[in-house]
Amino acid sequence: MDFESRYNAASAKYFAQNPALELEIEVAIAGSLAEIHAVGSTVEKERELRQMEAFAAEAVDRGLEIHELVIRLLADSPEQAQAWHLDHHRQIAGSLGMDWEKYKAMNLIG
């Protein structure tokens, strides 16, 4: 499962566990329909944006990066969490064009 799939699953789980927040978002959207349409957006895009913002705010409130919140919500075991952490670091190393072994050494990853 790639990060986007994990993010989507974690977000869905988060909102399923927080129905009041989901309702709050829907009420805010309903009160903003004219503005949403005036800027050429859609209710679906606005919902996605507000959910992303709320999910990111939850991560900040917990003192976590978004990828860490995703891992904490979805990982079935410490081993799976560790594998996802390593995958995240591999992606960072790759995006930096850095050799994996060098990246691990620089970031004290065993």
Image (tube, rainbow, N blue to C red):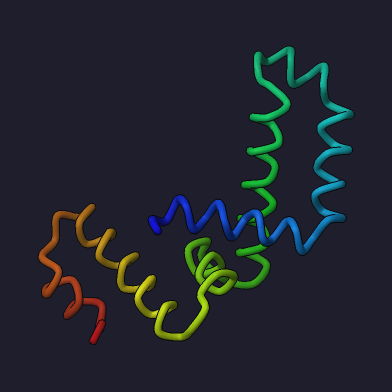
**Residue under the point 74% across and 21% down:** 36
**Residue under the point 42% across and 56% down:** 3
Q: Is residue 62 left or right of residue 92?
A: right
The image quadrant where one finds the N terminus is: bottom left
- Vertical side of 105 occupied by 19: above or below: above
**Image coords of residue 47 (percent x, y):** 71, 36
**Residue under the point 25% across and 77% down:** 107
From the viewer's side, name the closer residue of 8 and 92: 8
From the viewer's side, name the closer residue of 48 and 60: 48
**Residue under the point 73% across and 56% down:** 15
Q: Is residue 36 left or right of residue 90?
A: right
**Image coords of residue 6 (percent x, y):** 49, 58
Query: Residue 45 falls in which quadrant of the image?
Result: top right
**Image coords of residue 51 (percent x, y):** 68, 46
Q: Is residue 90 left or right of residue 54?
A: left
From the viewer's side, name the closer residue of 1 and 54: 1
The number of numbered discs placed on residues in the rendered structure image is: 0
**Image coords of residue 72 (percent x, y):** 56, 74
The image quadrant where one finds the C terminus is: bottom left
